[in-house]
Structures are given as C-alpha cells and as structure tokens.
Amino acid sequence: MSKILIKGGRVMDPESGLDAVSDVLVEDQDIKEIGRIGPEKDMRVVDATGLIVIPGVIDLHVHLRDMEQAEKETIETGTKAARKGGVTTVYTMPNTKPPLSSAAAIKKYRELLKNARVEVGIIGAITKDLAGRELADFAGYAEPGIKFISDDGFDVNDEALLEQAYKKAMENDLILVTHPEMDSIGAGGVLNEGEVSRKLGVPGQPNEKEYKAVERGIRLAMKTGARAHFTHISTRESVDLVREAKKTSDLISCDATPHHFSLTEAEALRVGTLAKVNPPLRTEADRMAIIIGLKDGTIDFIVTDHAPHTEADKSDDFLKAAFGISQLETSLAASITELHFNQGMALMDVIRLMTLTPSRFAKLRVGRLKAGYPADITLVDLETEKTVDRMSFVSKGKNTPFHGKKLKGWPVKTIVRGAVY
C-alpha cells in the first residue's frame, strides 16, 4: 500500500466549503483522510506549504485527435498536456477521423486509452459520420457507457432531425451537447463580424449565427422535454437566452471557455491565425457578458475546447487556417488570472466551475476532496506568474492566442489516482 501525505497546503473543496490549511492523506488511489496528520515512516510527504490544494480539474470538452489525426495530437500527448495543466479528467469529442459515431468506432478508440495519462471519457456523435443527415444509433451507445452526444464542430441544422435527436436522446438517457451555429447565417465567416474582420478584409460571423441556434435548441428542449446543453457560448445574446430559460426550466445548461472570457477579437491583430477559433473571439461586451454569466450561475462550468493543430494547419491565411486553440496547459491559470485576479470572483467559485459543477453534470465521483473518493488532486501556486510560451507546450498543438500573455496562478503538481506528477 502506497501512502502520500500532502502536507500544509490551503485545502479548498467546493463541495464541503472547506478552506483551511490542512493535510491530505492518500492511500493507493483514494483519499484516506483530511485534517492534521502526522507523517509516518512509510509515507511520501509532498510539501504543499504556500500552495492551494484543490480537486483535479475536469474538462468536459476536448479534442484528443489520434488515429488519422495523430500529427495534431494523440491520446498520450493530449493527456500529458492535461496533466501538466492540472486537469485530471477529460471528455473527448467525436469529430475524430474516423468519427466516433458508432459503438464499434468507440470500442476501437477506447483501445487507445491505454496510452492516457489522465481519466478519459468519450462523447458519441449525434449523426452518422457527423454528416448531419441521419442519427447515429443512440441505443448502441449504452454498451460503451456513453453519456453525452455531440456533433461538435458542426450543428445539426435540419430542424426535424434535431427534434428527433432530442427525443431519442431523452429515450436513451443521453444529453445533447450542442455546438450552436446556424449554417444559413454568416457562412464562411472566419472571425467575429465587426471592426477587426473588416480591418483584415475577411468574412465574419455575426452573433446571430450562434444565438439563433441557442434559441432553436431551447425551443426544441422545451417541446420535447429533453435536456439541452450548449457548449462554448460566446455571445451576450446567448447568455441572456440561457439565463431567461433557466428561470422556468431545469432542462437547459451551458459552458464557456477561458478564451471567450479572457480575450476579444482584437487578438487577431496581435497573433494572427492563432486567434482563429469557432465560435470566434467576440467583442468586449460579449466577453463581459460571459463573465457575468459565470458569476451569476447562468453558465454552469468552464471547458477548454482544446483543439490542437499543426503549425501548417495554422497558416498565415485566415481563410485557410484551421479553427482552434490548444488550451489544456493554460486553462487553469487563465481562469484564475481573469476571473479571480482581474474580475474579483471568489477563488472557491472559480475552482467550483472547473471541478464540482462539471463533476455533477457528468455524474462523476471526482471533483471533490473527500475521504473514500479518488485521489485526483491539483496543487496550485497562486503567486507564480509566467508568460505563456507556446513552444514549451507538451501538446503537439502549439496554437494559442495566450502566447506572450502573463498568467498568474499555475499548477505545480498534479496527482492522478494517487500518482504524483
């Protein structure tokens, strides 16, 4: 039996509300005890003096690639990046090559999880091959234990098919995770439609492209009684729609990313195509609306939408460059920096948005510090301030608009099921 004593850190657990200097004893893969604990001969002691000790971060929206996209990322490199960033559980999206749109494809992909360095969940596709024409076999997702379905990267724009998806999802105890985007609006847009897109002479995406899809999804959820989750919302109108829907229904939820609450469209002028992401970085008004939504509970939790690409994929041509940001290594520091240090959100609330609330959404046992629960733990130095250097990333994807930004509050140790890194 291995024993690890995390000694003298500020232990912060959003479920119990514990916020005190304490010790955490880990035995094998689980938390054994939290309190004042004296070291014993057979214990490995991790000195956490001056650090905060929090549950491992949970990220319910990443793209781990692999298979025919191994040049962009593999399960091994993506989960190593997660571990470096203090993230101990990730859920990977189905827009792999080939797509994860059947139980057989998921079973094959799951064989690759032997290379994972953190816990990995899989999200199944809504439509076969992500083509948006025919629903995948939702009943078949039961055997591999799929909880969520998404065509992330695309929306299902056939409304009759989308309504059928909501009904079938409810019948099979699945939650639709919608990438809200109306194909008929702002087609070909590569940045937010506004001052920056006009200055660069490229087509833009208006806010309407997103919020009209959110509006549609809420309407269909109310009609069918199915749950609807909107991922990476980026516009003030989307926040308002979700806030209003939540007043009368518990069917609606959403998440947001650090890049959408930390950055604006202006980053495209600073770092070029590194700032090209879908949905796009928006205006300052949209950014602040996301922050207000996180503060008042409209937005349920934080995800990264970690989307690694090669340097060639991120060419200097905005029209040709791939959408996406590599985010796993910076998400915790970016969230602490913007939400806590810059916007004054209580640190416990930031931690909750990255641990407990995604855990409850996914019905996981992690995301809290509690005796008898898995020892997924992150140690953070709130005083460490570093400038992001994208070329130092463990991820194969070095594509981040946070490059050159100073962030404060970095993970220094990550414990995954009792193993210290």
Image (cartoon, rainbow, N blue to C red):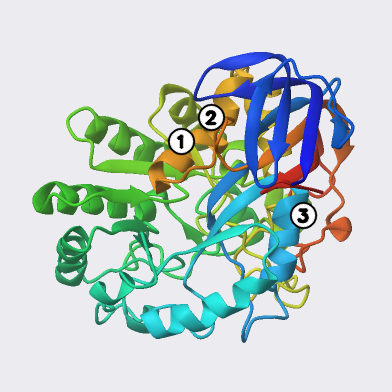
Q: Quadrant of residue 183?
A: bottom left
Among the two numbered marks 1 and 3 on one chain, the one whose residue lies closer to the N terminus: 3
Q: Which residue is mark 3?
A: 271
Q: Give the left or right position of residue 40, taking residue 18 as reference.
A: right
Q: Which residue is mark 2?
A: 352
Q: Which residue is at 59% across, 52% downward?
A: 89
In this rendered view, identify the residue nearer to me: 158 or 252. 252
In this rendered view, identify the residue nearer to me: 309 or 111. 111
Residue 75: where, in percent of width, then height?
Answer: 66, 70
In this rendered view, identify the residue nearer to me: 311 or 392. 392
Q: Which amino acid type corresponds to the residue marked 3 in the rendered image? A: Val
- Badge 3: few (under 14), some or many (20 or more) residues near its Cα, within 10 Å? some
Q: Is residue 220 visible in the rendered structure shown here?
A: yes
Q: Which amino acid type corresponds to the residue marked 1 in the rendered image? A: Thr
Indicate which label's residue lies in the foreground, 1 or 3: 1
Q: Which residue is at 46% across, 67% downward?
A: 153
Judged from the image, the secondary structure of the residue bearing numbered disc 2 is: helix
Among the two numbered marks 1 and 2 on one chain, the one whose residue lies closer to the N terminus: 2
Q: Which amino acid type corresponds to the residue marked 2 in the rendered image? A: Arg
Residue 247: where, in percent of width, then height?
Answer: 22, 27
Indicate which label's residue lies in the foreground, 3 or 2: 2
- Badge 2: few (under 14), some or many (20 or more) residues near its Cα, within 10 Å? many
Residue farthest along the left direction in this orientation: 223
Q: CA distance from mark 1 to mark 3?
A: 33 Å
Tell me whether the residue at label 1 lies in contact with that at label 2, contact meaning CB atoms closer than 8 angstroms.
Answer: yes
Judged from the image, the secondary structure of the residue bearing numbered disc 1 is: helix
Q: CA distance from mark 3 to mark 2?
A: 31 Å
Q: Which residue is mark 1?
A: 357
Q: Which residue is at 83% across, 56% downward?
A: 390
